[in-house]
Image: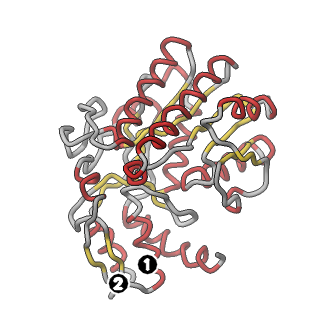
Amino acid sequence: MANILVTGACGQLGSELTAELRKIHGNERVVASDINGPVTLIGDGPYEHLDVMNKQHLEKVIEKYNIGVVYHLAAILSANSEKNIDLAWKLNIDGLLNVLQLAQSRKMERVFWPSSIAVFGPDAQKKKTPQNSPMNPTTVYGISKVAGEHWCAYFHRKFGVDVRSLRYPGLIGYKSLPGGGTTDYAVDIYHKAVAGEKFSCFLEKDSALPMMYMDDAVKAAIDLMNAPEENITIRTSYNVSAISFSPEEIATSIQARIPGFDVAYEPDYRQEIASSWPDSIDDSAARDDWGWKPAFDLKKMTADMLKNLPGVLEGM
Ligand code: AKB
């Protein structure tokens, strides 16, 4: 039986997705890989130190473990991409092309690749952004995601590679930290609240963005990958949506449980990125094609974060 490779397995989504895939398929069948640790979150099972820009090494790993399915998550997020545009383009696009080319030549079963709401720019409809809105991003990360989506559609159309993708919003979870995104504040705010400290938010208080709790994000990837091939009508990337809130709204949901939690708004360069993105997303295609339905709203997410985060921080 073919095995599964996760690239970027030590990242925010990767660590939780790897752990879940190992629960489903068994530790030995899910190979985790990354260029940075920590590997503590992903549990037991095979691990390879892997730079996805190195195609030869990637192929060796695929061969060594008889990989048939790849969850290709290695990428640089929006805010960090602006700081190193060459590396962001190289990693986000060359890495994807390496995976797609190997999926084609080795006739692999399936590939998952995350796109992002960052594909949309200031001219897209702000609220309930439709699947096929104009995609004119103003960030290098967004440009790489638009290009990546088209590469996915091309490899499917031209070579029959079964690559599937989701346009993730900001992801929030208590087990792992995001790294270098514009939506990171929505994780950091819980850490400060639990520590009893004041939070300085790098976005304006009314800057609403689409977001999703990690349990829903992991479930979305697995549901999409398990959907029958004939149900997948979108081969660029599916809009997926769960929650939409502003910094002030998430602060209020925390203050309902931790009265006195104090937040200051000190926007920096990330505000410009956030302002170019949608406030909320229309995901009816994902709901119709493969039954997408999120389980967490803001209230439920805050309750879960505040229940579980203190234990995680104690164990660190
Ligand atoms: C980021 O902020 O860069 C990511 C994303 C929305 O893709 N979380």
Q: Is residue 153 left or right of residue 310?
A: left
Q: Is residue 53 left or right of residue 144?
A: right
Q: CA distance from mark 1 to mark 2?
A: 9 Å
- What residue is rendered at 41% in x and 36% in y? 145
SS type, badge 1? helix
Q: Is residue 167 left or right of residue 265?
A: right
Q: Is residue 208 above or below residue 282?
A: below
Q: Is residue 140 above or below residue 132?
A: below
Contact (CB < 8 A) between labels 1 and 2?
A: yes
Q: Is residue 153 above or below residue 203?
A: above
To which residue does mark 2 refer? 261
- What residue is rendered at 20% in x and 42% in y? 122
Spot occupied by residue 124 in the image (x, y as percentages of width and height)? 21, 38
- What residue is rendered at 30% in x and 79% in y? 263
Spot occupied by residue 57 in the image (x, y as percentages of width and height)? 72, 34
Image quarter in which the C terminus is found: bottom right
Image quarter in which the N terminus is found: top right
- Residue reaching furthest to the top: 158
User: What number is the disc on residue 129?
Assistant: none
Q: Is mark 1 within 8 Å of ligand 1?
A: no
Spot occupied by residue 117 in the image (x, y as percentages of width and height)? 35, 43
Q: Is residue 207 left or right of residue 71?
A: left
SS type, badge 2? loop
Mark 2 belongs to which amino acid?
Phe
To which residue does mark 1 refer? 192
Mark 2 closeness class: few <14, some 14–19, many ≥20 residues within 10 Å: some
Mark 1 belongs to which amino acid?
Lys
Question: Residue 100 versus residue 13: which sits nearer the camera?
Answer: 100
Counting residues from the start of the chain, the first of labels 1 and 2 encountered is 1
Spot occupied by residue 22 in the image (x, y as percentages of width and height)? 72, 48
**For residue 142, what is the image quadrant?**
top left
